[in-house]
Each structure stands twice: as C-alpha cells, then as structure tokens.
Amino acid sequence: MNQLYREIAEQPEVFRRIATTYVNEETFVSWHEDHLGTIYLTGMGSSLFAAYSAYLYLLSRGFPVVYIDASELLHYGLQGIRDVDTLVLLSQSGESYEVLEILNRLPSRPKTLAFTASPKSTLARRVTKAIDILSGTEYAVTATKTHTATLVTLNLWAMAQAKDKEAFLHASLDLELLAEEAERLIRTSPEWTKKTLESLEFAQGAETKVLIARGPALSSAWHGCLLMYECAKETFLGFSGGQFRHGPLELAVKTMFAIVLDPSREDPRTPGPSGRRACRAGRGGAPCGRNA
C-alpha cells in the first residue's frame, strides 16, 4: 500500500475522530461567536477549496462573508480588513507562506482563527484561536485526508456561527454514515476502479478534459483538478455548470471528456439542463445520467 492510498484509507477514522471530539453541546457553545464585521475565509490550494461549502452555507444565512485566495488577499485586499472582522486562515501545514504573510502585513487587528492539521505550527501559535482538524500529518504528494477534514470541521464551525444546533449535533450520525460509505468504497476500490478505467478508454484521446459542478460540489471539482495535476499529471479544467455554458461548452466541437458532479438529484436548486448538456458534450453527443 503506497502512502497516498494509506492516507485515503485513513479518512473514515478521521471522520469518526472529528465526530467524537467536536460534535457535542460544549463545542457548539464554545465555537459560536457574534460577528460584528465580515468573515474572511482564505487559504491556498486544497485548503481553500475545502472552505467553499462553508462559504455558501454562511452566505445563504445572511452572513457578510468573503471567500478569497490568500495570495490575492495578501496583495489586493488587506487594507479592507477591519478590527471588527474575523479572518479565518486555512493551512493544513500551518506554514503556508501566503497565509503567514497576511498576518505579517495586516494593518488592522481582526479576530484570527486557524484551521490546521498542525496545532504546533507557526500559524497556530500566531492566531487568536486554532482548531485542529484532527487529520494528523499528511506526507503524500497531494492532500486527501487533510482536505476532507478541513471541509468537515469548517462546516461544523459554520453551523455553530449560524446557531444551527440541530444540524450540528446531527452531524455525528452524518459522519458515521459517511465513514461507512468511505470504507465500502475503499474496500471495493480494486474492483470498481478497474471497471471504471475500462469504461473510460474512450476518453484517452479527448482534446479537452473538464470537471463540472454546482454549489458545494464545486469544492470537489476544484480539488479534483488539483489531484489530476499532482497525481495523474493530467490537465483538467474546472467550471460551475453555469460558467461552462457561457463559453467553454464551445470546446465540445472537438473531442471532450466531461465529469459532472451532481450534489443532489433531489435538490431543486441543481438545474438539470446545464448538467445534461455538459454530459452530452462529454460523450460526443450521446446522453448519459446526471451523476455520470
């Protein structure tokens, strides 16, 4: 078993560890804070992508919230951060240059909160409060368990800010179901990956490869592109369903391979036409299911 696969296989245990440690009334109360200003969610790479679900959650509940690449915030946004704001800094290593440099250059004194896998890191020592994502150290070339651990802990934190106690406490069951499903997928991976690869032979000659998603699933699309770059050395482009329709769809005049991520078949906010058109484009005009 190589290091990457080993860390993928550790994810069910990480989900259970988060549930056991954080999903309780004491944590719910201690994590909640009143926010007089804007909440900034910032990081780099997979840590930033993991925050998109929490960003949408807070946005839909009326919070003034900004989701921004740490390098862009560093060079173009620091002057807008005020003392009343909350700066949420995401870095699994706790040593990301851009994130630490934000702290070095801040012209104001906002509340600072870190989500990190390294509670003894420079970042954890320098912020107002640090939350351990409980994934443990990651050694493989790309993020797997730290990405999902950041996503889960940050979503729990967002629920606490919104005072959504019912959803917060119910997350214990959700995480156990997620852990069981992840274990099943990992256990059966030799079989289903072989079948998947055989069925995807047609994609080898595709001139363009894209990942398309909407809502919280965009986090997976962006992270999926990163995994393709770092592990498979393949170039994939990531788009929201709407953005794909406005221009990139024209790339389908050539051979295109499209992976469409549908966050929920039952979600009425997931527009069917965009997903179906993208899927048809990915198969050279042949129809396929929305979860293809």
Image (cartoon, rainbow, N blue to C red):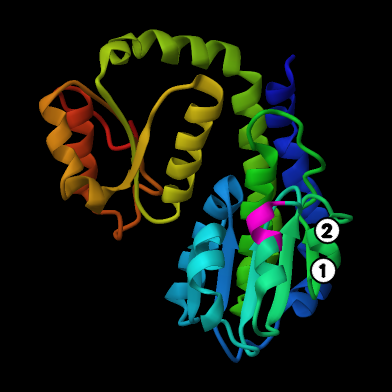
Q: In which quarter of the image is the N terminus?
A: top right
Q: Dot 1, how many residues are within 10 Å of its Cα: few (below 14), some (14-19), or many (20+)?
A: some
Residue 99 among magenta residues: yes
Question: Which label belongs to residue 143?
Answer: none
In the rendered structure, the answer to whether residue 17 lies left or right of residue 284 reads right
- Please determine whether, in this image, residue 65 is positioned above or below residue 217: below
Residue at x 32%, y 45% (from the top left corner): 239
Name the residue that disc number 1 marks.
Answer: 126
**Residue 198: x, y in percent?**
39, 8
Residue at x 81%, y 40% (from the top left corner): 137
- Please determine whether, in this image, residue 236 is positioned above or below residue 216: above
Indicate the amino acid at tag 1. Arg
Residue at x 33%, y 9% (from the top left corner): 201
Secondary structure found at label 2 = helix
Which quarter of the figure has residue 156? bottom right
Which residue is nearer to you in this view: 271 or 227?
Answer: 227
In the rendered structure, the answer to whether residue 255 lies left or right of residue 40 reads left
Which residue is nearer to you in this view: 144 or 83?
Answer: 83
Indicate the amino acid at tag 2. Thr
**Residue 81: x, y in percent?**
57, 81
Q: Can residue 172 be seen in this view?
A: yes
The magenta segment is: 96-100
